[in-house]
Image (cartoon, grey):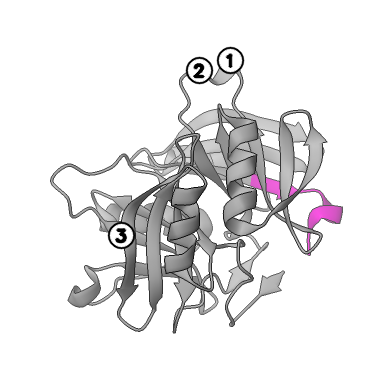
């Protein structure tokens, strides 16, 4: 279990949210799947709903506001001590800034970027909201990874922007290391994933991958990739009842902590 009430180190995946057409429907799905307590916010934040386990914030769900909304997808926010400086680094390294740095009242400062491989991500400079308060527990974030068709260029990009070092796991997959510790992963999408867009993937810890996959279907979701075993645990890729994809993993005991 990881608990935290202070800002995360720069470059760490520190927050996740998903924007959906129907917030109440999404809240019911994730409450039924992970046991989240979903707390819709006030009108001044557009109803942005914080999701908690045991009183600790683990994610958020937002209602779509645009007439031409983006596809339903989980967004990973990477921690920064200076969002404006990070925006400049994104541009200098060959990325794009879709949403310029902006204050979110007293909560913090954010931007939305796109890496050279085409994956969208957020950047969060903590204010009163420091990010995820509970991780590596059932129903919470356990892993984040960037997958694209431009592996080497994306590695260079993220090293330049966030100062990551890399731990090679395979020729086309590495960990994103901060101070010698993995903060996430980065890999290449092969030809077998020709229809899969570049993205930051979100993994939630669960006690029983197969049972959670079955429960997702009962709640109106779908199984995108059936459960399989990996060196790190048993995983599956699922979709919620509005099409938002995410992965679940029952970690091997040595991976927990």
Are the residues at dot 3 and dot 2 in contact (C-beta closer than 8 Å)?
no
Residue 240 lies, in percent from the top left, at 41, 43
Query: Residue 222 or 132: which is nearer the viewer?
Result: 132
Q: Which residue is located at x 48 percent, y 26 percent?
A: 196
Q: CA distance from mark 2 to mark 1?
A: 5 Å
- Name which residue lies at 28% across and 74% down: 41
Q: Are marks 1 and 3 in contact (CB under 8 Å)?
A: no
Name the mark on residue 11.
Answer: none
Q: Magenta segment, which residues?
A: 249-257
In the rendered image, residue 168, in percent from the top left (x then y), is placed at 80, 39
Q: Is residue 14 left or right of residue 65?
A: right
Badge 1 crowding class, 10 Å Cα cut-off, few under 14, some 14 to 19, many 20 or more, is few
Residue lying at 44% horizontally and 50% vertically, measured from the top left: 91
Q: With respect to residue 155, does 64 lie above or below? A: below
> Can you see residue 36?
no
User: In the drawing, what numbered circle is on residue 191?
Assistant: 1
Query: Within the image, what quadrant is residue 145 found in?
Result: top right
SS assignment at label 3: strand
On the image, the x and y values in percent for residue 208 come to 67, 47
Q: Secondary structure at mark 2?
A: loop
Q: 197 or 149: which is nearer to us?
A: 149
Residue extending farthest top: 191
**On-image quarter of the C terminus:** bottom right
- For the N terminus, give its image quadrant: bottom right
Label 3, residues with CA under 10 Å away: few <14, some 14-19, many ≥20: many
Q: Which mark is residue 194?
A: 2
Is 182 displayed left or right of 143 in the figure?
right
Residue 93 locus on image (x, y percent): 52, 46
**Sooner in the amino-acid sequence: mark 3 or mark 2:** 3
Q: Which residue is mark 3?
A: 62
Q: Is residue 64 magenta?
A: no
Quadrant of residue 210 in the image? top right
């Amino acid at each position: 279990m990881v608990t935290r009430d202070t800002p995360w180190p720069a470059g760490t995946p520190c927050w996740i949210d998903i924007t959906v057409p129907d917030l109440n429907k999404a809240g019911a799905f994730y409450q039924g799947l992970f046991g989240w307590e979903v707390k819709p916010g006030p009108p001044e934040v557009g109803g942005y709903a914080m999701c908690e386990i045991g009183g600790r914030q683990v994610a958020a769900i937002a209602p779509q506001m645009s007439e031409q909304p983006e596809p339903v997808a989980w967004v990973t926010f990477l921690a920064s001590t200076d969002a404006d400086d990070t925006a400049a680094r994104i541009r200098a390294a060959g990325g794009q800034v879709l949403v310029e740095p902006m204050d979110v009242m007293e909560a913090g400062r954010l931007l939305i970027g796109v890496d050279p491989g085409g994956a969208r991500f957020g950047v969060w400079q903590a204010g009163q909201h420091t990010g995820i308060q509970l991780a590596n527990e059932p129903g919470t974030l356990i892993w984040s990874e960037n997958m694209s068709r431009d592996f080497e260029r994306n590695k260079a990009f993220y090293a330049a922007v966030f100062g990551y070092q890399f731990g090679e796991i395979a020729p086309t997959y590495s960990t994103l290391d901060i101070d010698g510790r993995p903060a996430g992963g980065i890999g290449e999408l092969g030809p077998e994933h020709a229809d899969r867009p570049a993205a930051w993937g979100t993994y939630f810890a669960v006690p029983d991958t197969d049972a959670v996959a079955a429960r997702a279907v009962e709640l109106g979701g779908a199984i995108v990739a059936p459960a399989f075993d990996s060196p790190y645990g048993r995983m599956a890729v699922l979709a919620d009842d509005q099409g938002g994809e995410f992965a679940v993993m029952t970690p091997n005991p040595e991976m927990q902590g």
